[in-house]
Amino acid sequence: MPLKDTPIQRKLLSVMLVTSAVVLSLMCSAYIVLEYFSYRENLKSNVTTLGKVIASNSAGAVAFLSVKDANEILSALKAESHITRACIYDSKGEIFAKYPDTLAASSFPSISSRIDDFYYENDFLKGFIPIEHNKQQLGILYIQSDLKAMYTQLKNFAFVGILLIGASLLVALILSIRLQRTISDPIIALQQTAKVISTQNDYSVRATKHGNDEVGALADAFNQMLRQIQINNAEITAFSHNLELKVKERTRALEQQKDFVETILNASVDIIVVFDRELNYIMMNRMPADYTKYSKDELIGKNLLQLFPSMEGTEFHMHLLEALKGETVHHSRFKSRETHRTFENFFIPLRDKSNEVYGVLTLNHDVTQIAEANDALEALNAELLKSNRELEQFAYVASHDLQEPLRKIQTFTQLLSSNLHDQEKRESFLNKINQSANRMQQLIQDVLNFSRISNSEDAFVETDLNHVLETLKVDFELLFREKNAELHYAQMPKVRGIPMQLTQIFANLISNSLKYTNESPVIRISHSIMTRDEIKKYPKLMDTGTYTKILFTDNGIGFDPQFSEQIFNIFQRLHGRETYSGTGIGLALCKKIAENHNGIIYAEGEPDKGATFTIILPG
């Protein structure tokens, strides 16, 4: 356990014992170190003195070359157990005598240059002393002492020191246990008092003062703090009670206000929703649950794009982002992909006190019925405009095309009455009158056919276009032979439609191809099923269901591209009647049949390069 986490009693004991142990250890260590260096100096002094005495006594033996006397002098070193070896060198540097005499000469060093000097080397004290007589050097004494006695003495000192430290620590422990209580007991008592107060929340408890020292001052400060806390606690309790009453009153008022707001919001027929900056639902009325599969509780807190991924990138999503930038947005007509309803939407940015936008309020008014009524009204207006145009065209026909054969009949009748006696002229006039009557009959029949398409109530059935084309090949067989025409088509599909009208649209296109040509007609018919991307290119087509595209191509005289829409107008002719016969109703009839099948038809062409008619039909 770390020292900071140990109880204060142990902490005090540890501090006292560690301090005592460190002090005693330092004292003993200092004494041993001092003894070590002192012993070395004393040893060096003693060996130097001993060496000088041996050198002085050996001067006569060396002078008279008495080896025996020299060895006897050296043997006196046996009395000094610390002297391990010694020798006498003569004036030539040769070993003259040695101690012990059993050692080989190689066990001794050569004469050192450090004459009259001692030094320590490898736990030995070594030295060379000159042997002189009457200031004349006769030889050199080498002497060597070990340090075993010193190490033995130091070990004894260390042992005694350890015993002294142990005894001292024991005494310090006994004293510390008794003395630390004067410090720890008041602190522990203060800690126990604090624990009682914290567990029982009883601020009337007071700490006991044990003296006038710092701990006593701490107890006084602690008791003063308890008295202040007791006073503050009473004030806080009273304030808390009053605050609780106020909170209850305000909560009740807020709940009433919230209920009132929710009642107003839920009474609205509009969808009211508040989004935060991350497009999470944070508030709404009951109306969103009527339009989605989620309840109000399931929507609050959820993200718009996580619940409705298809909303990403829609106008609704973009308007929300614009409102988060601070712009108020009004979208008068929004078609929801999820609900298939039409809404008038308002996107209002919500700002805080610093004028920062923190959310968006959306008001969504369901205008589906109004939008459907407007669409129906627009469709009806379009149909009325179309009918008015057809009536205008019909009036034009009545005033021009239908009156023209009548005028001819009147003119040729008057001429006939004036030339009854001339048989040749009579027959010519009667032939002219007959042609005009036939022309008028064809015009009236085409107008009736065109009018009948508008009010057709024939049932739609699955129609095989292969059967339709086979039938028309039989009907146009003689004209095909006469014109040397060719009709090419692959396997055609089945579509849902009115067989008679589909037969008529192909008959009119084949008739035009056979009529408006300067060479042998070649007609090619092909088809394909349109992809979703292709369907989107035509605004008049619905984006649901499937469509079949039929291409009708010929090699006729073609037409100027600027007339690609005009040729579908009733009684519209791009070529003179003298060159190509016809009433100008055929392509208008084709367009009306295509529209009656909820499809479209359009033409492409160039002069003298043929024409291509594209028919798009559902199914």
Image (tube, rainbow, N blue to C red):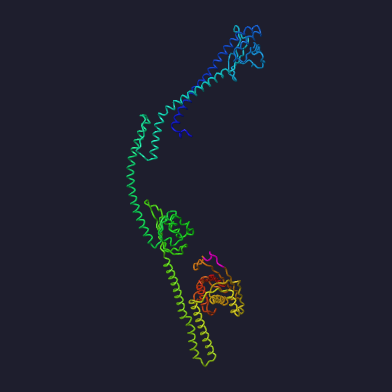
Relative to 558, is 413 above or below?
Answer: below
Extreme-bottom residue of the structure: 421
Choose between 567 and 265: the one closer to the eye: 265
Where is residue 485 drawn, in percent x and y? 61, 76
Asked if the stretch drawn in magenta spans residue 532, the answer is yes
- The quadrant in which residue 63 appears is top right
Q: Quadrant of the C terminus?
A: bottom right
Choose between 276 and 452: the one closer to the eye: 276
- Which segment did they paint magenta? 529-535
Asked if the stretch drawn in magenta spans residue 464, the answer is no
Relative to 258, is 507 above or below?
Answer: below
Q: Is residue 224 visible?
A: yes
Choose between 551 and 297: the one closer to the eye: 297
Relative to 488, is 220 above or below?
Answer: above
Where is residue 108 drawn, in percent x and y? 64, 16
Count of marks placed on residues: 0
Residue at point 44%, 29% (across, down): 12
Q: Is residue 330 visible?
A: no
Choose between 543 and 268: the one closer to the eye: 268
Where is residue 571 drawn, in percent x and y? 49, 77
Where is residue 142 drawn, in percent x and y? 62, 14
